[in-house]
Image (cartoon, rainbow, N blue to C red):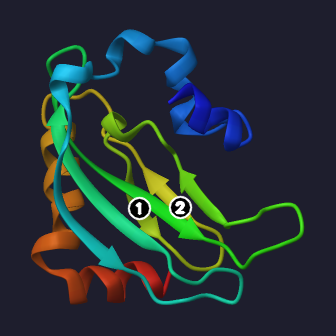
Amino acid sequence: MRQLCAENDGCPGTSGSIEHTPQQAPGPQQAPRELCTVALPPTPSQAGSHLVVLEGTDGDGRAYVSQVLVDRARPSEDDEDGVQVQEPGFWLGVRYTALQHGRAWSSAGHGPVQPEVNNEQARRACTDTASWLSLVATR
C-alpha cells in the first residue's frame, strides 16, 4: 500500500490513513474477496477504467465493502502503461458517488449504522449495475 501511495502522489485523499493508522489495514490472513468488477464508460481523459468491489474485514475487525477505481489513463511520455489506482486503501469503505466531471467519493464513517448503509450502497455496483452506472456517470 505504501508503494501504491508513493505512485499515487502520496495518497493525499482518504488513503492517507495508510500512513496515519496503518494498524487498520487488514493483514495477509485477511485478504479481501472480490464481489464484482464493473467496466466503466470511457471519458475524454480515461479509457479502460474499472471499478472493483471488495469485501472483507479490516485490521480492527470491522467488516467493509469498498469500491476501488483502477484507471488506464491515455498513455503519456512519462507514464508507460497508464495504470492508476485511486484511493488504494481498499479497506476504508470508499464508495464512488460520481465518476464524471471530477470524481467524488464517500467513505464509511463510524456511526452506529453508517458503515452498514455504506456497505449496502457500495454493493449496489454489483447488484444493480445499470442503475448504479446511470447514477454515477451523470453526476
Alpha-carbon neighbours of circle 2 within 10 Å: few (<14), some, or many (≥20)?
few
Label 2's element?
Answer: strand
The residue at the point 20 percent across, 33 percent down is: 31
The residue at the point 10 percent across, 74 percent down is: 127
Q: Position of residue 128 (x, y in %)?
A: 14, 80
Q: Where is residue 92 in the image (x, y as percent from the top left)?
A: 35, 35
Determine which quarter of the picture holds residue 80.
bottom right
The residue at the point 41 percent across, 78 percent down is: 136
Q: Is residue 100 left or right of residue 8?
A: left
Q: Is residue 62 above or below residue 125?
A: above
Q: Is residue 137 above or below residue 60?
A: below
Alpha-carbon neighbours of circle 1 within 10 Å: few (<14), some, or many (≥20)?
many
Q: Name the mark on residue 104.
A: 2
Q: Name the residue under label 1.
A: 96
Indicate the amino acid at tag 2: Ala
Q: Name the mark on residue 33.
A: none
Q: Residues at badges 1 and 2 in contact (C-beta under 8 Å)?
A: yes
